[in-house]
Amino acid sequence: MKEQIGGYEEAVSYINSLPKFYEKSSMENTARFLAHLGSPAQGCKIIHVAGTNGKGSVCAYLCSVFQEAGIRAGMFSSPHLVTMRERFHADGEMITREEFTEVFRFVREKLKTLPQELKQASYQTYFNEFLFFMAMVFFARRGLEYVVLETGLGGRLDATNAVPDKELCVITSIGYDHMEYLGDTLAQIAAEKAGILRQGVPVVYPVGQKEAARAIEECASRIGAETIPLPKWAIKEIKIQHKTIDFSLHLNYYGYIGFTVSMPALYQTENAALAVLALTRLADGRITMPVIQAGIRKTVWEGRMEEILPLVYLDGAHNIDGIRAFLETVRLHPCRGRRKLFYSVVRDKEYQVMAEAVALSGLFDEIGVAPLTDQRALPLTELEDSYRQYTGFICKAYEDLDTAFRELVQNKDDEDMVYIVGSLYLAGEIKALLRRPRHD
């Protein structure tokens, strides 16, 4: 009897059952299977984005500007916060459940009719790779002009790197994350990210981290890719407002141009600036400076210093570099009341180093911890131990996220500020709590 996958929920369940990381034969086999699918979206102009922090935000800025310019564009991003459909966007909208199920079935059926080379290699797909295949089929069916691809992990060996032709590459800030896969130094990690580069294809990147920038430039020089660096001095006159940040960016042709981002996180100025540099390099007549300014201003990206309730901010920082950037923003937020933090993390992160940075910042009067529901969650006792050794704030432990979130929000005074940080899984669970109907 022919195997059938039912509706959307069954498709999601199947994908979640796949191996999560590099349990596959080779990048060559990923490319072979992409060709087996009919090389979907091969006519699209691909912008490939890698990095440690800020990848998703850069992708969101790019697609917002494309939409403002009236250009049909799609985005494949990871991870998702609440629903797997968040990973697939086209023309500014998330994929429908019906479209998701249709492209899932198409890819699943193609896995049953492998070409001989893949059969001999005992080829099996993995989680992010399967989603990437679905995305390319989705984009092809939508008939898009531009496609923005965010790497899931690394760059050189990431499934998204199987696309043969690219219009432009962007590498965001490099930090210490996934070191078991990518290397122990910034140079090693940056070199893995720079594996997305192609001969003759420009790459936009920040130069604030000299070690990382040097590794990117060496890779670009070796293969003949044009480098477009973003120096730190190019961003100036930063003014953080309650809900926005204004800044000026130096562009060679225009001089200094003013921009506004609608996510009040200091690190978003660099992410937006990288997107602007990339957009100006495309030399597309529809993408004028007023269009870029408007698109940047209208960009919304969930879970990145997002104000989910009045003076309650949700941020997906989940490694030490992200936490430091988060703390830098909190320090610049004017607060007339108390600052409270709600923190949780997965156990395979440098949670003790992250907790130390938070505790020693002196920014918070109260820190609440609770374990995630994810299987990788750091247990409550270890979350508590991460903070109990420090003084200067009240530390409260909660058995579950729901209780912790409700108490922190309900007990805040009007001028208190609450921040939620530590994991994108935490951001997703909080978003799910907010969307859940309340009957009490």
Image: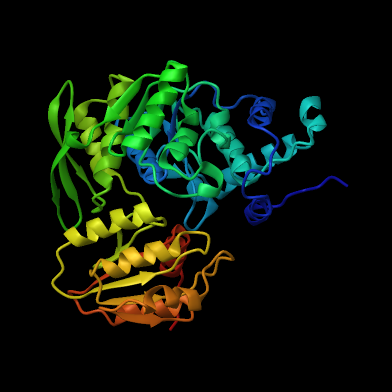
Answer with the quarter of the image where residue 405 lies.
bottom left
- Asked whether residue 75 is in view, the answer is no
Residue 129 at x, y = what percent? 61, 40
Q: Say if 248 sits above or below 169 in the image.
A: below
Residue 318 at x, y = what percent? 42, 57
Answer with the quarter of the image where residue 65 lies.
top left
Q: Residue at x 53, y 60 (%)?
A: 348
**Image coloring type:** rainbow
Q: Residue at x 26, y 36 (%)?
A: 273
Q: Residue at x 27, y 46 (%)?
A: 268
Of the pair 190 and 21, the residue shown nearer to us: 190
Number of callouts: 0
In this picture, residue 97 sits left or right of residue 189 = right
Q: Say if 35 sits above or below 249 in the image.
A: above
In this picture, residue 340 sits left or right of residue 397 = left
Of the pair 183 and 20, the residue shown nearer to us: 183
Of the pair 148 and 221, the residue shown nearer to us: 221
Answer with the quarter of the image where residue 23 lies.
top right
Residue 302 at x, y = what percent? 37, 54
Q: Pick the quarter of the image with the C terminus.
A: bottom left
Q: Residue furthest right?
A: 1
Residue 20 at x, y = what percent? 62, 50
In this picture, residue 156 sits left or right of residue 52 = right
Q: Residue at x 48, y 81 (%)?
A: 399
Of the pair 158 and 87, the residue shown nearer to us: 158
Q: Say if 210 sits above or below 54 in the image.
A: above
- Asked whether residue 203 is in view, the answer is yes
